[in-house]
Every structure is written in C-alpha cells, then in structure tokens.
Amino acid sequence: EAKAGKRDSVFQLEIEVFPAQEVTFNDTICEGETYTGHDFLPKTTGGTYRRKLHSAVHGCDSIVTLNLCMHARRYAEDLEVAICPGEPYSWHGHDYNRAGIYRDTTISSVGCDSIETLIISYAEAEQTLYAESHIEIADLPFTYYDPAHPYIAIQTPISYPEGTPAGTYIDTAYVQGAQCAAMLIHTLVITDPQGLETIEGANGTPRKVLYRDNMYIILDDEWYNASGQKVADPRL
C-alpha cells in the first residue's frame, strides 16, 4: 500500500528449477565378492540400488542408480579316480600320490571362480571282489555301481542296454596300477517274468506256476517240472 506522496515499489522474483539429474551404472561381481564402487555402501548381493548425490554445480541432489549383477560360483562335477599307493596322478598340472579330497579353483568364462574337486582312492592290491545283481528285463538298461568301490564302475563301466535277453552274465573289471590291481567279478541275473502265472501257493511256500504253457513247481527258489524233476529257471 503506497503512502501519501510515495509510489509503490514492484519486485519481480524469477525462480529457475534445475531438473534432478539421474545417473545409472551397470556392474557385476562374483559370488563371495564385495562391491564398493561409485561410493555405494558395500554390497554382497545383486540388485538395484539408489542413492542421492549432492551436485557441486547448482546445489541440487542427483539420483545415482546401480544395477548390480552377481555371477554365482560354479562347482564342477567331482572327479573320482583310483591309484596304487605311491603312484602319482596328474591333475591341473600337479601330481597327487595320496588318497584324499583335493580342490582347485579355476576362472570361468564370466571371470568368476569355478571350484573343481578330485577324490582319490587307493586301488587295493591283488584283491578280488565279488558282486551279484538281479534285475528284470523291464529294468534295462543296467549299469553296475558299487558305492564301496566307485572307481571300478567309473573306470570300467559294466553296462547292459535295452534288448539284452534274459540270462546270467559274468563280467570281470580291473583297476590296474603300477604295483597293484583290483579285480571285480560281477554276476548279473536278468529274468523275464512275462507269462509267469501263479496257480497255487505263495512266496515262501511251494508254488505251482504256469510259465509259457508249461507247469512248474517252485520250492525255495528251485524249479521243478510237472514230473518233479529239478530244472533250470526257464526265465533265464
């Protein structure tokens, strides 16, 4: 309001609004690493992170966004081998001559660590192992595996494909070293239950069965024909 004899004064205020700047960074880390770049607090997992940055130019805040991708550490399938006592086994440029579990770290294609494991067992000197498996034709294909001696199945697989006829098969597998050898004698019995029909009796008692139009009696897993004569298992 103007006073007598004075004029009003007019003031003009101009406000300039600076837009908030946004900056985005994309980066990666490997599993187990800590990210500390671009002044962010330490990060150990992947994700999207944001923080404010005070600008020195006009005093306004800027928004900094970090897209952090974490590559998982890779674990290769275990390698199991058998050696004779004192016999060296070369792996990744190193020789190992004692049973045990060994690990090595290599760099994967994305630049992160990859963990590989070597499991060494001793091949037993001049020992013969015996094993027997019973399956039906419907269970084929079949591969022998003995958790007590895994190196035998790995070094010399004993396998039977689909279509293998019923019967008894005996296979010999060796683990040979410089001064020792372990031998496995494996017996596989493949049966064909198709066409077997129980007429009388039950498991554990004498059973009268019909197999492919012939009558048999089964007693204590032994087969007898209709005349009472002991015969071979006709399913084999």
Image: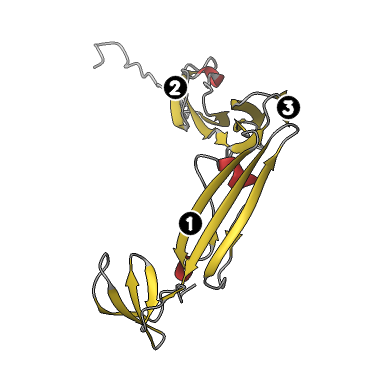
Left or right of 206 in this view: 188 = right
Q: Is residue 229 above or below residue 3?
A: below
Instruction: Name the kind of residue labelled 1 in the image.
Output: Ser
Q: Which mark is residue 52?
A: 2
Question: Upstream in the sequence, badge 2 or badge 1?
Answer: 2
Task: Give residue 133's mark.
Answer: 1
**Looking at the picture, how far across and down is residue 155, in whole percent?**
65, 45
Within 10 Å of disc 3 (Cα), the crowding (few <14, some 14-19, many 20+) is some
Residue receiving disc 3 = 88
Spatial distance from mark 2 to mark 1, Cα to Cα? Answer: 69 Å
> What amino acid type is highlighted by mark number 3?
Pro
Residue drawn 37% across the image and 66% down it: 221
Q: Residues within 10 Å of mark 1 (few under 14, many from 20)?
A: few
Whether residue 191 is situated above or below residue 156 in the rendered picture: below
Estimate the spatial distance between the alpha carbons at disc 3 and disc 1, rounded to whole Å: 34 Å
Front in this rendered view, residue 61 or 224: 224
Q: Quadrant of the N terminus?
A: top left
- Please tell me whether mark 1 sits on a helix, a strand or a loop: strand
Please tell me which residue is depicted at 38% across the width and 18% down the height of the picture.
11
Say the numbered circle drawn on residue 206: none
- Of mark 3 and mark 1, the one earlier in the sequence is 3
Q: Secondary structure at mark 3?
A: loop
Q: Are marks 3 and 1 in contact (CB under 8 Å)?
A: no
Q: Are marks 2 and 1 in contact (CB under 8 Å)?
A: no
Q: Is residue 29 visible?
A: yes
Residue at position x 61%, y 34% in the image? 124
Residue 208 in the image: state x and y as whole percent. Answer: 29, 78
Q: How is the image coloured?
A: secondary structure
Query: Which is nearer the N-term, disc 2 or disc 3?
Result: 2
